[in-house]
Image (cartoon, grey):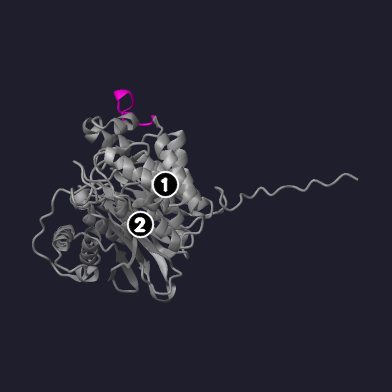
Amino acid sequence: MADKIMPSSSKPQEGTAGFIPGFLGAAVADEPQAALAARAILSAGGTAADAAVAAGFALAVTLPSRAGLGSGGACLAFSPASPTLVADAVMFLPVPGGGGGDRPAAAPMLARGLFALHARYGRRPFESLVSPAEQLARFGAPVSRAFVRDLAVVAGPLAGDPEAAAIFLPGGRAPAEGDILMQPDLAATLGQIRIAGVGDLHQGALARRLTESSVLAGGGITPQALRAALPQYVPAPRVDLGGGLLVAVLPTDGGVAAGAAIRALWSRPQAIDVASARAAGVAAAWRRGAFGGNAQAAVDSADVAGATLPPLPATTGFTTMDREGNAVACVVSMNNLFGTGRVAPHTGMMLAASPAWMPPAMLSAALAYAGGTSTAFVGAATGTGQEGAALATAVALAQSGAARRALPTPVPEPGRANVLLCPGGLPTDPARCSWAADSRGSGLAVGGN
């Protein structure tokens, strides 16, 4: 008698796209391929943190002008299962690379920061979250409008570095939107991180390669600086808006400024001028050290005089949520558009600018959630646009909350915002969730089923 052939299951396995049926969450990023990478991870059963890690590594390939492996930044993370009702801030701010040169470089912080986020909030294997970026670098990624815009600003200076010119200006020509950009050296570096782990970039074979090649790029990074470049978990300061609604913000100038502005806007969403003055004053005071590093005091402060800020570097933001109500909002920067403008030979890594050379970027993100017995994610926003970032975050979250729809109107110039909104709370009411990327930017918001 012939053996019976049993029908194979057509259900996708965990770890493959399509594993999650129905609502899976959402992702918003300033570059489309990063948002798609995040959505694929959500579809495969990953958490919001898993999706954010995939998005961050993808941005290192598709938007290295703002988010290369050499970059630093910060993330807010929230879980409705947290017993403390305190959102975490995962801080991986740019730090000096310890070397000299005519363009001092920062120590790379992105990979360690994303690893720290994953260690506390991730579910999928970390190496599987690096793979999408590695594939984009190895086989080529379509050049986005966001990258074309950034490249147009600094194409001249980039042409002065042979490594950067070979990657981003092949044949002496800037790529057009939709062209395929391949980065084999960066793919090899990402592959090494995937196989050997993030630690290899800081005290292994990859670390030795980077320290040697960074000297050739004119902005040396020392082994000591690489080893010491560690992320931190910090309780996020928060604003209590009453009725059990809390807003957590980053303990950065842009975060505390957004928190102060949200407090001003919540009862009066149209009071933009008041919120703008408060945000600028708190951000400037934070940079002066007026609060002694006490982020909660900065958020709770009244109007602060003196709002002078230097010209600030560009940033990029991305935010994710999963169907369980976990959420993450991150902002990262190369501390200058394209960092030092130089690539460390044989690594594919654009070196970020040292904060000892350039003023630090304004990093701004906020995350709203319901406390009490019905803990749930309500909304998240990231703000970019240099000095407009904090106000963008505050206006986006406040006006979206009032309108119960993500980004009902554009935030004030020069700010840009990305928003996730679930006014009924997640995980209980996904049908009312919405998400949006700033309509004046080149990002993408994806999610749903």
Residue density around tag 2, few if under 14, some if 14–19, many if 20 or more, within 10 Å: many
Q: Position of residue 219 (x, y in %)?
A: 24, 43
Measure the C-alpha gap from mark 1 to mark 2.
Answer: 32 Å
Q: Is any part of residue 252 visible from this angle?
A: yes
Residue at the image point whose x is 66% and y is 47% from the top: 10
Residue 73: which quarter of the image?
bottom left
Highlighted range, magenta? 169-179
Q: Position of residue 170 (x, y in %)?
A: 34, 26
Residue at the image point whose x is 38% and y is 62% from the top: 77
Check disc 1 and report its element: helix, strand or loop: helix
Give the residue pinned by disc 1.
205
Foreground residue, 282 or 251? Answer: 251
In this rendering, would 196 be left or right of 113?
right
Give the residue pinned by disc 2.
329
Q: Can residue 176 be found in the magenta stretch?
A: yes
Residue 282 is labelled as: none
Give whichever of discs 1 and 2 has the lower sequence position: 1
Foreground residue, 409 or 80? Answer: 80
Foreground residue, 200 or 237? Answer: 200
Check disc 2 and report its element: helix, strand or loop: strand
Q: Main secondary structure of the magenta part?
A: loop
